[in-house]
Image (cartoon, rainbow, N blue to C red):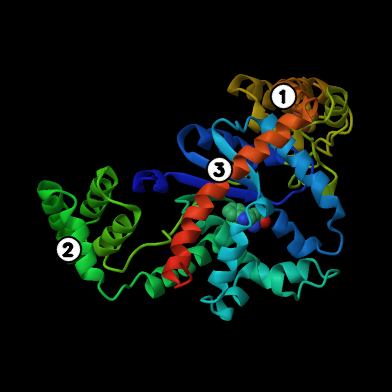
Amino acid sequence: MTSLADRHARVLSGMRPTGRLHLGHYHGVLKNWVALQQEYDCFFFVADWHALTTHYEDPSLIPRAVHEMVIDWLAAGIDPDKARLFIQSQVPEHAELHLLLSMITPLGWLERVPSYKDQQEALKEKDLATYGFLGYPLLQSADILIYRAGLVPVGEDQVAHVEITREVARRFNHLYGREPDFEQKAEAALKKMGKKAAKAFASQRRAYQEAGDTEALQAARDLLAEQQNLGLEDRERLLGYLEGGGRVILPEPQPLLTQASKMPGLDGRKMSKSYANTLALNDSPKAVEQKLRTMPTDTNRVRRTDPGDPARCPVWQFHEVYSSADTKDWVAQGCKSAGIGCIDCKQPVIDAVLAELGPMQQRAAEYEARPNLVRQVIEQGGAAARASAQATLAEVRQAMSLSYS
Ligand code: TRP
Ligand code: SF4
């Protein structure tokens, strides 16, 4: 059984299948996932249903994009022995929870999500006045809540979706966590903790509820997590009893804000496929060299003898990501005094990018040579995810009076 402590430590994140990833994805998202998998129980999935909300007219490109993206995750160092990797549509429990949550979600909550209007504006050529598109933040809520994830690493643009997830969870617990005999059941559960622990819990609860003592709240949560004798439902009751509500069937997740990547594109704008300014994780060393050699520099530095200004040069931003303080000094001095040429200046960046991509490309090649292995990773990840999703769904069904037996 999953303890409460584990639950809080569970991390979930998803990415739409966009095909080959680039260094912007690596520095903005994947590097962070690789670090998180060392410390938390991580679930990372390909959001193929989310892709359909905007690309329903031509889904034929999705399977390849999924495959390429999974390869790039593995290449970047996501370790299938540490994290569960899977494809959303292979865990249909997400869809059932989405449906059930749709029953309790006011339309206004979805209409007010900023991305709803923004994206419709940005993608004018598409008809996004669909039921699926309106509902996609709720699908995302289901993605998160079905694993009772505690932490959701996302960028700034996705924080509103985690926020709506919290509201939906709160509403769900409010509606279905209030059993008529809740107090009695919670008190019976308390007895199962043993005298000493029960007494400590009760006084921590009082300290929190009467004096707002959040340290006592945390201590009580920790105490709960340590209890061996409590089943899942009793834990949920006691958690709710502690916090002053009903049973916490779906815990509220927290966003784990990923810092915006400092990695710019080759032209100094945000790295993005649509700007054609990317270094892909699978670009050959030759392509990497060529792209970096020809990338623009300070436009005022026309001749080798003209002094330049790093502040006006996209290459400098690469140095900010990759270079030591010494190298950066050498660049700043050499550029401003015309002591170095731009090709000289780019060489340490070229070396650093090649060194970073080398091991990734080696891993990618290993996986590409063994498509069965990739399939197996996805199957195993999917099976583990399903087991966890089914456990949540069983409770949700029961809470919503849908378990017939
Ligand atoms: N909506 C996210 C995006 O467009 C992807 C996503 C789907 C996601 N489900 C999620 C992210 C759950 C975090 C958690 O980038
Ligand atoms: Fe840019 Fe370096 Fe050339 Fe200066 S020397 S303009 S920082 S590439």
Disc 2 under 8 Å from ligand 1? The reply is no
What secondary structure is marked by label 3? helix
User: Could you tell me residue 117's position as x and y percent?
Assistant: 69, 73
| Residue at 73%, 67% in the rendered image | 119
**Between marks 2 and 3, how big is the CA–CA gap?**
42 Å
SS class of the residue under badge 1? helix
Exactly how many numbered labels are in the figure? 3
In this view, the mark in front (3 or 1): 3
**In the displayed structure image, the side of residue 189 where residue 122 appears, left or right:** right
Label 2 sits on a secondary structure element that is: helix
Between residue 314 and residue 194, name the one nearer to us: 194
Q: Which amino acid lies under the numbered mark 2 shown in the image of this protein?
A: Ala
Identify the amino acid type marked 1. Arg
Inter-mark Cα distance, 3 to 1? 24 Å
Answer with mark 3 or mark 1, whichever residue precedes in sequence.
1
On residue 211, the disc is: 2
